[in-house]
Image (cartoon, rainbow, N blue to C red):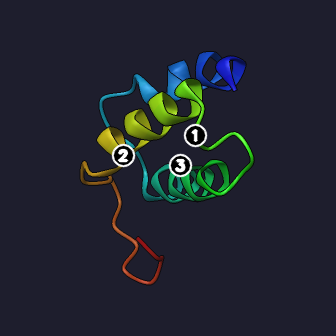
């Protein structure tokens, strides 16, 4: 999981996101939040970072996509 945070650093460091990226990050959050390592510090930290960036408005709204 520590490597995942490193690999996602470029995406998570962006100032703005498209709706597609926001949706994918939310799906990743759901996936790692239900996995066997969900209570590990790296997963908790990554999920917190995902939450921080996905509350920002997306560049392109897609009202039919789940939030």
Residue drawn at point x = 39 percent, y = 33 percent = 49
Residue 2, horizontal then vertical, whole percent = 66, 18
Q: Residue furthest right?
A: 36
Name the residue carrying label 3.
Answer: 25
The answer to whether 9 is drawn above or below residue 64 in the figure is: above
What separation in Å lies between label 2 and label 3 (alpha carbons)?
9 Å
Comparing 57 with 46, the one in front is 46
> Is residue 4 toward the left or the right of residue 10 in the image?
right
The C terminus sits in image quarter:
bottom left
Name the residue carrying label 2.
Answer: 51
Residue drawn at point x = 69 percent, y = 39 percent = 37
Residue drawn at point x = 51 percent, y = 60 percent = 23
Residue 30, horizontal then vertical, whole percent = 58, 59
Residue drawn at point x = 75 percent, y = 47 percent = 36
Closer to us: mark 1 or mark 2?
Answer: 1
Comparing 39 with 5, the one in front is 39
Name the residue carrying label 1.
Answer: 39
Closer to us: mark 1 or mark 3?
Answer: 1
Residue 39, horizontal then vertical, whole percent = 57, 40
In the structure shown, which secondary structural element does the residue marked by tag 1 occupy?
loop
Q: Are marks 2 and 3 in contact (CB under 8 Å)?
A: no
Q: Quadrant of residue 15?
A: top left
> Is residue 30 toward the left or the right of residue 45 in the image?
right
Q: Number of numbered discs present?
A: 3
The crowding category of the residue bearing disc 2, from other C-alpha atoms within 10 Å (few below 14, some 14 to 19, many at least 20), is some
């Amino acid at each position: 999981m520590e490597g995942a945070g490193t690999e996602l650093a470029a995406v998570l460091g962006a100032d703005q996101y498209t709706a597609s990226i926001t949706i994918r990050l939310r799906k990743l959050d759901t996936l790692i939040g239900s996995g066997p390592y969900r209570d590990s510090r790296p997963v908790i930290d990554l999920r917190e970072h995902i939450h921080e960036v996905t509350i920002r408005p997306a560049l392109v709204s897609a009202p039919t996509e789940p939030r």
